[in-house]
Every structure is written in structure tokens, then in C-alpha cells.
Image: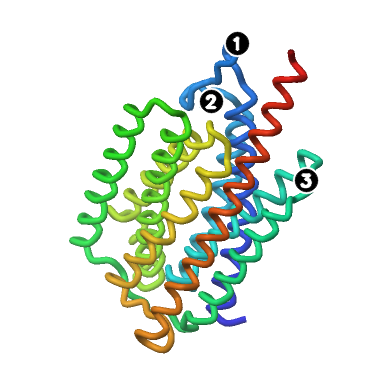
Amino acid sequence: MNAWGIAVTMSVAAAAFHASAAVFQERMAGSHVSGPGRRLGTLRLLSKPRWWWAVVLTGIASGLHLVALHFGPLTVVQPLGALTLVLALSLSAALAGRRVTRGEWLGVALTMAGLALLLHLTTAEAPRVALSPDEVLALSVLAVAGTALLVFSAMGARRLVVRSLMHAAAAGICFGIASAMARTVTIRMSDHGWSEALTPATAVMVALAFGGLLLAQAAYRAGVGAPLATLTIVNPIVAGVIGLQMLDERFQAGVGGAVVAGLAAVVAACGVVLLARNRAAVTARRRDEALTAVR
């Protein structure tokens, strides 16, 4: 198996573990109550042993993701993160004992078609370009500024769904930039040894990854559908821009290939949004049925 194949395989495996963690986090966020109708805050979940199983799953997924980034470019690895929503849908439906709706299947089909076309346009050989120290600093500042703006905006939002989407977008920024840092760290370690693990890029990568995990947990308080869709779209966009602008990554067929890749990304994004909308509708219906049963 060549490097491209390893990157794809590891990305799919990482998506499976991320999906499991996302469903676990959703159940944790929605099942614990501290009073009538009140859910536990994100920080209080840290004291729950079961929540740390989601951290373990995310850690395994992150390890697989690092391997994928070592062998493949961001423009290959990050879009495959959209499989997280597809797999989370299947797992959640199986655990709930329900059938996947026709709209959800259409969302899966669009997502898979868009991803397949994107993979067809990516190059098998990824350029081994690492971020410079100045680029690491610039991206760190952008990550802090972007997430802070979204988090403070979320604090002023009255609707839970709006706060969740802002938290999800912030998490997507964290994960996207963390992946660019991870790509840099793996390349430097491969070329210069383990001493390259003790660098600012590594510290930023770890901080952003853990911060993204907490932000994602906060986002899932409104359910995993729309927040996970937002995270799934924002993450590869941020990472893809970094890869194309800073890491010399390209699509096949030059400008024409880039245009087609953009259209493929739109198709995949439409599938993600459709999945999220159907998932939100199913979640709302189940919540209403549960409330009716309690009454």
C-alpha cells in the first residue's frame, strides 16, 4: 500500500473513532441532569468518569489522524473527516433502534459522492512542506482570535442552537489548525528525530486539540447533528486553505481541477447539511416523544 492509501485508510479509521466519541459525548451532554430540565455544564462533565471514555476514543482517533497526516496531505485527510457524521448517524441509529430515513440516506449519498470526487482529484504524492516558525506563530494568533470571538459571541446568544453552532465553528477552527500543526510536527520528526516533538508547534497542536474537544462537547448540548455538521465543514475548509496556501498542496489538473474540487466540496457539504437537518428532526421528534411519555 502506498502513502496515499495509508493516509486514506487511517483517515477512515480515525473518522470511525471520532464518530463513536461524538455519539458518546452527545449522550453524556443530554442524559445528565442537575435539576428539573437542567443539564450539567461542560466543565462539570469533566468529573464524570464515563466522559473520559470519549476522551480515550478521541485520543485513539487523534493518533490515527496523526499517522494519516504523516503519509498524506491536508487536502486528502481533512475532507475525509466528513465520514464522521455519516458513521455517527449509523451508530446513533443502531443504538436507538431506529431506521435511517430516506433523507438521511440521500445525505449519505451526496457526502460520499463529493468525497469520492475529491479523492480522485488529489495527488498521490504529498509535498513534504512544514510550517515555518513565523507561520506557526501567525496561525496560533489566528486560532486564539477566531475561537475567542466565537466563544464570546456564543456567550451573548440567547438560543441554545446558536451557541452550539458557534462553539462547533470554534472547535472546527481549533481542529483544522491543529491538524496543520500535526502535519508540521510529523514531517519535522521524520526528518530530524524525536527532538522535534518539543517545539512550539507541538504545544499549540495539543492545546488546540484539547480546546477543540471541550468546545465540541459544549456544542453537542444541542444534539450532535447540526453542531457536528458545522464542525465537519469548518475543519476541512480551514485545514484545506492552510494546505493550499502554506504547504504547497495542489489538486490534479491545475486550476480546472481546483474548480471541480470546489464543486465536489459543495456537494459533500450539501450532504452534510442534509444529514444534519434530518438528524435534528429525528432528535427533536424523539425528545417530544420522551416528554410526552413522562407527562
**Residue of label 2:** 45
Give the residue drawn at x 63%, y 47%.
278
Determine whether the residue tagged by mark 2 lies in a helix, strand or loop. Answer: helix
Q: Is residue 171 left or right of residue 54?
A: left
Tag 1 residue = 36
- Label placed on residue 231: none
User: Which residue lies most toward the left here?
Assistant: 134
Measuring from the top left, give residue 260's x and y in whole percent: 45, 79
Marks 3 and 2: in contact by CB < 8 Å? no
**Looking at the image, is mark 2 or mark 3 earlier in the sequence?**
2
Label 2 neighbourhood size at 10 Å, few (<14), some (14-19), many (20+)? some
Q: Secondary structure at mark 3?
A: helix
Q: Residue at x 27, y 70 (%)?
A: 246
Relative to 93, is 117 on the left or the right?
left
**Of the residues under marks 3 and 1, which one precedes in the sequence?**
1
The percent position of residue 294, horizontal first and vertical second, equals 74, 15
Q: Answer with the quarter of the image where residue 39 lies.
A: top right
Residue 207: x, y in percent?
Answer: 36, 44
Of the pair 64 and 195, the residue shown nearer to us:
64
Amino acid at pointer 1: Pro
Q: Quadrant of the N terminus?
A: bottom right
Q: Of the residues tagged 2 and 3, which is closer to the observer? A: 3
CA gap, disc 2 to disc 3? Answer: 25 Å
The amino acid marked with disc number 3 is Ala
Say the numbered circle drawn on residue 94. 3
On screen, residue 122 above or below 167: below
Q: Nearer the viewer, residue 251 or 223?
A: 223
Identity of the residue drawn at 65% across and 49% down: 88
**Badge 3: how crowded within 10 Å, few (<14), some, or many (20+)?**
few
Q: CA distance from mark 3 to mark 1?
A: 29 Å
